[in-house]
Image: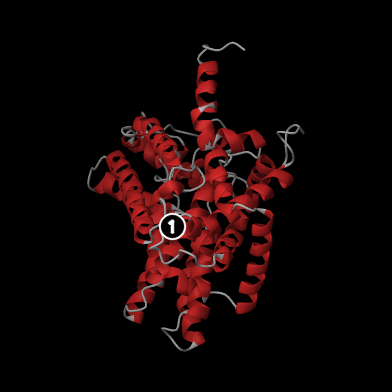
Amino acid sequence: MVNAILALRLLLYIFSMLHYILSPFTLDSHFGQTEFLINYRGGFVRRGMFGEILYKLATDCNIDIQYIIGTVIWLSFIGLAYVFVRLLQKNNVCWWIIPLNFTFFGADFIRKDYLCMLLVVGIIYFLNKDSMNRWSRYITICLLSIALYNLHEAFFFVIGPFATYYLLFKDRAFKSFTARLLWQLPVWGCFILLLKYHGDVSTALAIQNSWHELYPSQIPLIDETACEFLAPERNSITALGWNTSETLHFHHSKIYIPSTLSALEPAGYIAMPLFYLLIMLFLSRYPYLFCKKTSILYGRNYTSFFLVVLFVFASMSPLYFGLSCDIARLCMYWSITSLSILFIMGQKKIEELFPTSLNHVSEKANIWVDNVIKRPKLACVAVIIFVGSPIYSYNFLQFITNSVFGAFFYTPYIWLRVNGYLVW
């Protein structure tokens, strides 16, 4: 029964994405594609590496870059889907986790999400590649990390702390702690440099206008007012000129401070921690409860993996608590990163990642939770069917409307209301 429901949900999602087949190949000035257009026309700036390559291809080689953007978007999506499905198959874990909006389908399709997550998975793969020459391995990890952070510096919070922890304290390719520390300097230096060159209004204007010269009908000419935080023309380029404190306040208030207090719209300080805890418990149990008997995870203790899920969440906490308000996208980064660490590194390494004392504390806490939730597998099925991530808000109703259940019932209802077929 659940197989049929989720398979239908997956088909509905794919059908809803059909209008994206051509849209990535048509350049526009909205957030998604302009994220690829940030270049160095206004000087070195965060996220500008990919856009600078595109700009050189457009000006020096006379290539229409909108086809490159569309191809990269689709290949990234297909590539990550293939890798994730293969990891599930290799570990004999059920595919039910795929169609959820807080896992694989939580990302924004026309953005860098799937491309960046491919690099995250690549970093995890090489972290685990013990048999590789240590110099080649460390250089590869550095290059992948630097490329990732130049695509989007926020992904440092997704994988940077875990990679640093693993290489400093668990990896023994270099016996000297000083040597391992020195290898982290290029990556951390890159991240600090990107924070310093975060951009301003003049940078945003120079970038936007450089693309206007090449695509005047698709990228409009703007002035300083377009770089204001709530300007109607705002996009990923103009966001470089946003005031930092105003941006942090907006993101924080959008998630945690309600416009009206009600049973369905409480303060986010109440709703969101409960949601994060629920997803944390779900992610840590899913691979162990929904795997075949032939899986190496079958019958194993999931308390060590719970610490991995908690570690990744803690690393991403700056994003959850002010640097972003795209909760579904953040949950996708969180879930795919945590599961990739487990599937690639394996159960044995997961059990050895953290001190024994921490594993004992995690075990006691999870035993207590399992005593409260008498049927954890049934509880996980309930989460799969009835819980979805809010897109930008904490409204309790969004947990249902963005779930698999909501996709079948609430979404058609809204469509009928919007189009005038229902009047009540």
Label 1: few (<14), some (14–19) or many (≥20) C-alpha neighbours in 10 Å: many
Q: Nearer the viewer, residue 339 or 419?
A: 339
Where does residue 11 sit, x and y in percent of width and height? Answer: 37, 34
Q: Quadrant of the N terminus?
A: top left
Would residue 423 appear left or right of 26 to someone viewing this image?
Answer: right
From the viewer's side, name the closer residue of 172 and 208: 172
Quadrant where the C terminus sits is top right
Q: Is residue 391 visible?
A: no
Residue located at (64% from left, 50% from top): 322
Residue 134 percent coordinates (x, y): 36, 81
Which residue, given by chain and number where applicable, does mark 1 sit on? 291
Left or right: 69 in relation to 235: left
Q: Please determine whether, in this image, residue 178 is positioned above or below residue 19.
A: below
Q: Residue 271 at what x, y percent from top left?
A: 69, 44
Amino acid carrying label 1: it is: Cys
Seen at 68% across and 50% down, the residue is: 273
Label 1 secondary element: loop
Q: Coloured how? A: secondary structure
How many numbered marks appear?
Answer: 1
Q: Residue 62: which quarter of the image?
A: top left
